[in-house]
Amino acid sequence: MSITRAFANAGTGMAAAARAAQVVSDNVANAATPGYGRRTLGLAAAQAGGAPAGVRVTGVARAADAQVATDLRLARGSAAAEERLLAAAEDVLAAVGAPEDPSGLEAALARVPSALHDAAADPGDASLLALAVDAIDAAAGALGRAAKTVATGRERAEAAIADGTRRLNSALEEVADLNRRVALAGARGQDTAALEDRRRQVIDAAAGIVPLRAVPREGGQVALATASGHLVLDGAPRPLTFAPAARIAPAMVAGGALGHVLQDGRALTGGGAGGLLAGGALGAAFALRDEVLPDIQADLDAVAADLARRLGPGGPDPAAPGDAGPLSDAGGPVGAAPDPGLAGRLRLDPALSAEPWRLRDGLRAAAPGPADGALLSARGAALSSPAPGAADLAGLARAPGARAAHAAGLAEGRRAAAGALEAELAARDRANGVDIDSEMRDLILIEQAYDANARVLQAIDAMLARLSEI
């Protein structure tokens, strides 16, 4: 080997060591950066004319485990979905109240027959009549507050769908741009690791909305598929569209007045619980808007209808056959199959508020009659002792809270499971991150390699100096 070639080989060794030191410094600097994959320098023996020519850098590799990354996104999406479901269920529970809660729905309904029986025991006591009217009004108010919470929850879910769609579109556009830049840099032989890091961060950030799986494509690019396998990005971005409703009425349903997320004119969220976009907070918002909250609304409506019918015209009440009774559907009688949202429309007859004696004598009585508790007793009995085969008002009253509690319990359990899985997968994912101790050990070896190559150059310099003396 000539001295010139030895000099050149040592130079390639020093250059490779310097590049390796740069890679280590990048790793150490980004030890705490989310989504950063540890870099390793690729080296290979160089050849020149079939003869050894030192060392060459083949590139910088980024450590990654695609399966762990996918599983982690699914776990994060599941945790985000259950968090949203739990929050909405807890809101309903707070509005409905626990059975022992004196301000809850069950307690408010239980006070109505008690107050009616008390008034029937002393029908001439105006204060007891007023308390009975107040109890009926309070029960209707409790149903109305719970119905308002359900309506607010559906509108929040609608807003969350719109926001999630917007943020998902932004992520898809950024990933498409990063794909283009990765392919261009790779074609030029440039390092693409930083671009891949950013792409990973964008995809991970979208996991809470809709968990996405990266599918490798030519040139270092990736396509993005949902948990169900639907490709939402493969090449140029195709925007998702969603037209939110300005206001959600109880009777509005998905596919009718309530829209879906579309891509290329195709509904991705049909079929319930987010459809092809299920698995994250977006799917949970659809489940709340279209399934969970409407079911609770139906439970509340069933209670409202039963309460209104039990208190309705009957017995000695001289009300007209079409009269609504003490409680009405926004002023009209409660029909056999009232429109959804009855619990929010239930109203106490204004005549009762002004003249509580009408609860005893009949809503349309011309004047107060003798202190007779028959009608009060009949109404109290209808609430507390239904006829055989009739629905149990107390059981109906428990249904909305029970459904909300069941939904909250399931969501809390699944959130805990998803959180534990997320923690385990995050630990496995960190194995592809930076280990400072390992980097320091590598740095010592790099320093030794650099020093050794420098000594070779010193030896060659000494040899050349000796030759010049001859």
Image (tube, rainbow, N blue to C red):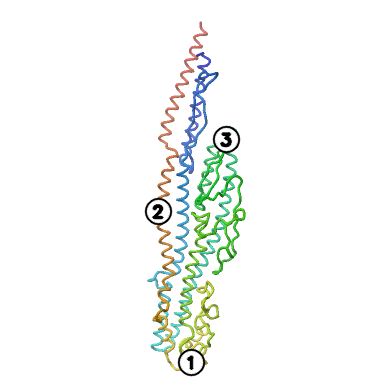
Q: What residue type is labelled 1?
A: Pro
Q: How crowded is mark 1: few (under 14 residues within 10 Å), some or many (20 or more)?
A: few
The residue type indicated by label 3 comes to Gly
Residue type indicated by callout 2: Ala
Residue at the image point whose x is 46% and y is 24% from the top: 450
Q: In this view, does 328 lie to the left or right of 430?
A: right
Q: Which of 72 and 119 is in front in this view?
A: 72
Callout 3: 10 Å neighbours few (<14), some, many (20+)? some
Q: Tag 3 or tag 1, which sits nearer the N-term?
A: 3
Residue 467 at x, y percent in the picture:
51, 8
| Separation of residues labelled 2 and 1 (CA atoms) | 64 Å
- Per the rendering, the mark at residue 186 is 3
Q: Which of marks 2 and 3 is nearer the N terminus?
A: 3
Give how far apart the Cα atoms at labels 1 and 3 are: 92 Å
Q: In which quarter of the image is residue 427?
A: top left
The residue at the far bottom in this view is: 370
Contact check, label 2 and label 1, Cβ < 8 Å? no
Check disc 2 and report the residue beneath it: 417
Residue 328 image point, x, y percent: 52, 80
Residue at point 47% right, 46% down? 70
In percent of the image, x 48 and y 67: which residue is there?
A: 295
Q: Name the residue under label 1.
A: 368
Above-or-below relation of 165 to 380: above
Residue extending farthest top: 470
- Secondary structure under the numbered disc 3 in the rendered image: helix
Q: Would you place residue 397 above or below residue 406 in this image?
A: below
- Residue 237, given in percent of the width and then of the height, sits at 60, 48
Q: Quadrant of residue 127?
A: bottom left
Q: Distance between the residues labelled 2 and 3?
A: 40 Å
